């Protein structure tokens, strides 16, 4: 994947901070085109104002003009700092995550980079509904920046090895992770989390001894390690330092703890659908897990995923 067209949403009133500069440094390394997008949330109050005074359009026009000027000034300032980036700006009106997804499609963006942190958030890792909606419904990878940016040296890509049908998507995720790490000079750990779900059943109902269960679990672990090794065969010539890690336990508990213990700077997660890959989907388990990660998070959909936002828009 080439990161040549990047979309960076800026919320109304949001200042460019160190997290944004981390994204712009990445874009500068990629000599990318960057679109700064500001979405004015379409408020029901505008309709009420129009009903009472007939002036809501003037209010919206004035706000749009103000934000366009401010965004253009930000782009000019950033252009002086990042010589390899070509900045453009765009202001849209509507529901933020919908407008962001549509703009990403129209501009053929290769990644959306969003600063999820606001002063109103109580926790450093608290990502809002807008970011989670983007992660669920965008065809384009989402890079959700951390509150406290730092040099990205250690990256973990989480893969699901429970089903061979996922291997194509795992290969897609690995290829993107390698390209990403190549651009920033980071090391990559390919991580899989699993739990021996049948242990209790085998012990209670099938007459398996503890030794037999332990041997079976060992074989299952070896099988997963074999799938990891096979997945890496296509990356033998890459320059990125890649290691593998298999964790055992409940994903939402074990994985965030591993990320914290190993001082991981960025996590890459695959998401097949709302209820797809066990452990690494943006369903209840993964949303709980993402909300525990205070590092940057990149989410990726398979090439076959069709955004419901774009489908609805195209059907209009």
Image: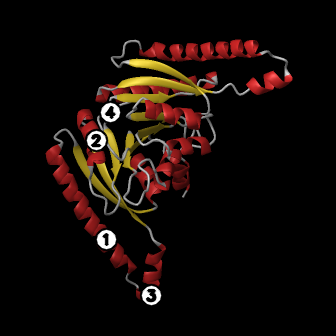
- Circle on res. 52: 3
Q: Which residue is mark 2?
A: 22
The residue sitting at 36% across, 27% down in the picture is 179
- N-term mark: 4 or 2: 2
Residue 298: quadrant of the picture: top left
Question: Percent x, y for residue 156?
Answer: 44, 29
**Figure check: 279 above or below 175:** below
Of the 4 image quadrants, the one containing the N terminus is top left
Q: What residue is shown with label 4?
A: 152
Q: Is residue 280 visible?
A: no
User: Which quadrant holds the C terminus?
Assistant: bottom right
Q: Are marks 1 and 4 in contact (CB under 8 Å)?
A: no
**For residue 136, side relative to residue 67 (left or right):** right
Q: Nearer the viewer, mark 4 or mark 3?
A: 4
Which residue corresponds to the image point at 35% horizontal and 19% vertical from the top-left? Answer: 240
Identity of the residue drawn at 47% across and 16% down: 232
């Amino acid at each position: 994947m080439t990161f040549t067209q990047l979309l960076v949403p800026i919320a109304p009133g949001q200042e460019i901070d160190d997290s944004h500069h981390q994204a712009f440094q990445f874009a500068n390394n990629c000599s990318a085109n960057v679109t700064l997008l500001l979405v004015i949330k379409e408020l029901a109050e505008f309709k009420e104002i129009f009903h009472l005074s007939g002036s809501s359009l003037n209010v919206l026009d004035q706000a749009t003009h103000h934000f366009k000027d401010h965004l253009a000034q930000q782009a000019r300032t950033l252009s002086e700092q990042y010589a390899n980036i070509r900045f453009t700006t765009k202001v849209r009106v509507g529901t933020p995550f919908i407008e962001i997804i549509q703009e990403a499609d129209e501009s053929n963006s290769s990644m959306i980079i969003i600063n999820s942190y606001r002063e109103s958030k109580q926790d450093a890792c608290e990502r809002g509904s807008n970011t989670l909606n983007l992660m669920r419904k965008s065809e384009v990878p989402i890079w959700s920046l951390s509150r406290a940016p730092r040099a990205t040296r250690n990256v973990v890509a989480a893969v699901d090895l429970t089903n061979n049908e996922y291997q194509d998507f795992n290969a897609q995720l690995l290829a993107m992770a390698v390209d990403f790490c190549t651009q920033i000079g980071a090391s990559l750990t390919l991580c899989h989390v699993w739990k021996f779900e049948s242990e209790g059943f085998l012990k209670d109902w099938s007459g398996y001894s503890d030794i037999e269960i332990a041997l079976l679990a060992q074989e299952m672990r070896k099988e997963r390690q074999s799938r990891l090794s096979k997945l890496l065969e296509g990356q033998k010539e890459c320059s990125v330092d890649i290691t593998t890690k298999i964790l055992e336990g409940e994903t939402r508990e074990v994985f965030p703890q591993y990320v914290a213990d190993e001082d991981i700077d960025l996590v890459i997660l695959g998401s097949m659908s709302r209820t797809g890959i066990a452990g690494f989907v943006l369903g209840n388990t993964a949303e709980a897990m993402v909300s525990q990660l205070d590092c940057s998070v990149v989410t990726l959909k398979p090439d076959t995923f069709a955004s419901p936002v774009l489908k609805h828009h195209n059907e209009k």
